[in-house]
Image (spheres, grey):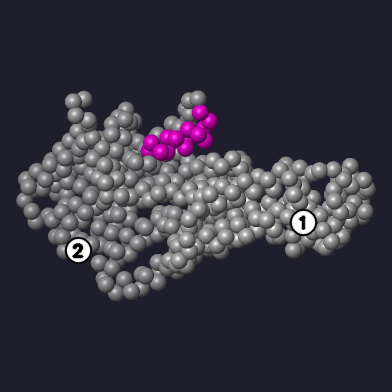
Amino acid sequence: MNRELFERQYGSAWAAFERMLEHLEGQSSGIKTGLKLDGFPELYREICHHLALARARRYGVELEERLNRLALRGHQQLYLAPSPITRSGLAEFFASTFPRALRRELRLFWLAAGLLYLPALLSLVLVHAQPELAYSFLGPEEAASFEHMYSPEGQKERASKLDVYMFGYYIYNNISVSFRTFASGLICGLGAIFFLVYNGLMFGAAAGHVGNFGHSEAFFSFVVAHGAFELTAIVISGLAGLRLGLALLSPGQRSRARALYEEARVALPLIYGVIAMLLVAAFLEAFWSSNSGLPTPLRLGAGALCWGLVIAYFSLAGRSRGS
Amino acid sequence: MLDTYRTVETPEGVELGLRMAGPPVRLLAYGTDVAIRTVLLWALAIPLATLGEVGLGLLLILFFLGEWFYPVFFEVLVKGATPGKRLMGIAVLSVDGTPVSWTASVMRNLLRFADFLPVGYGFGLITMFLTRDFRRLGDLVAGTVVVYTREEQGPRNLPAAAPAPPPVALGREEQRAVVEFAQRLPSWSSERADELASLAAPLVGARGDLAVVRLVALANWLVGRRE
């Protein structure tokens, strides 16, 4: 069979296939043509067969390109990825996938936690012992704004601010920071380590500095509740970043590209979980923590409850019965 | 051969051809997207600003979504291409040629930050030049490639000549080389064309001008012209 015969014999099938493709591709933009799609997969396989024939028989570049384009478009319609977000999927994610993913990475979790909390402790102690050291960690304006924020006047001012604005700000800022921590972990883990240590140092310095002015109570009753979610989320995004970095540093028996590809799939559920935790943290920080009018014991109690919840969730959720 | 043409094998046992998009066109697409996103956000910012602090709070959330999820939204829902990519005629696909999934798209766009380091997409560019298919770090992690979706310039751009069959059966790569030679002919000086055509002397049995003429005749045959 020569090329002309081949085209004449199957041209109508190709045209029919192209009409189906246009219909399917139009569906995502809402165009309805009422075309029947019976036999699409069979027709697709036939096109693949024709493509292979055209190549083997060397019918020419143009025909090959044309069939290749048809087959590629068909391939993409046939192998569309299903949407991952279903209600039961979401429930299962929070009931077991997320906490299990964290428990599998417990050693890295403690490493990341150490990288956040030890520098925090260090700068807290340093600033407490040597108050002027606060200015080595925080800029003068930053230090002044912390002093003001936790003073009685600052607390009143904050309470009068609209909470929706702060909610938006916490989402914008905190979730972006956790994404950056994760992504920059790819650079051999260095980025994740940097963000953890940096945030730890700043947090400790701020706490120490505010403490030197005698506002410790205001500071800790402010951060304790949402901190349970926010600090833990930052640790988890650090751990996810370290996972990526480790894939690059010690890929084992895989190529580095393959290791990255696989480890990222281990890390991604953690990042989805982090987004949820930071949303909770932003909500608490904007709508609960800023209520400085509430009695301190109540606020500390609520904070303890939050920490208890987070710890219980990660240690208990998603364990199968009897194990 | 130094080429941006790659094939992926499908479960049906055929190879599909993809043409990889390189850094310049992707940079243009990125720039276009940044412009579109900025205009969109500012267009939303003006009415929201009248709502006072509530509006600013909402605006910050929109900025957050725009920064991280604008590409994800378009890549997954609109045929693998953000508006900028679509304008440039490129799209994101999985390495196996299937449409990009949510997981892959989220991954490649989160890791954009790592590609951006240390400055101006430094790591991203280095990785693109080190990998075969111009994949930045995010693409490696997500298992994606960026390909051209525009149709290749067809044989219409071939200089017309009386077609002549090749003296021996040519392989696929050889056919492509001959046809692309003829397609690109108008953009070369005649000296350069002669020089390149002389490389095909064993095939056409001539050098210089005559080789060019014979190659064009061959190319016309290969794209299917018979008269």
Disc 2, disc 1: CB below 8 Å? no
Q: Quadrant of residue A201?
A: top left
- Label 1 CA crowd tier, 10 Å (few <14, some 14–19, many 20+): some
Residue at x 64%, y 49% (from the top left corner)? A50
Residue located at (85% from left, 48% from top):
B166
Q: Where does residue A243 sit, x and y in percent of width and height? A: 40, 34
Left or right? Give the position of B222 relative to A15.
right
Residue A257 drawn in magenta: yes
Find residue B108 and report its horizontal and vertical position in percent.
46, 47
The residue range painted magenta reads A254-267
The residue shown at (29%, 39%) is A98
Q: Where is the N terminus of chain B found, in terms of image quarters?
A: top right
Task: Pick whichever, A193 or A102, lies toward us.
Answer: A102
Query: Counting other residues with Cα less than 10 Å from the Cα at mark 2, is it few (<14), some (14-19), or many (20 or more)?
Result: few
Query: How many badges with numbers are in the image?
Result: 2
Q: Is residue A9 visible?
A: yes
Q: In 3D space, how far apart are the residues under numbered discs 2 and 1 (Cα atoms)?
A: 73 Å
- Residue A246, given in percent of the width and then of the height, sits at 43, 31
Per the image, the residue denoted by label 1 is: B224
Q: Is residue B114 visible?
A: no
- Identity, as a three-letter code, of the amino acid under mark 1: Gly
Identify the residue at horizontal 37%, vertical 60% (top origin): B63
- Residue A144's tag is none
The residue wearing badge 2 is: A161
Query: Closest to the observer: A5 or A273?
Result: A5
Q: Magenta region's main secondary structure?
A: helix
The answer to if B51 sits in the magenta stretch is no
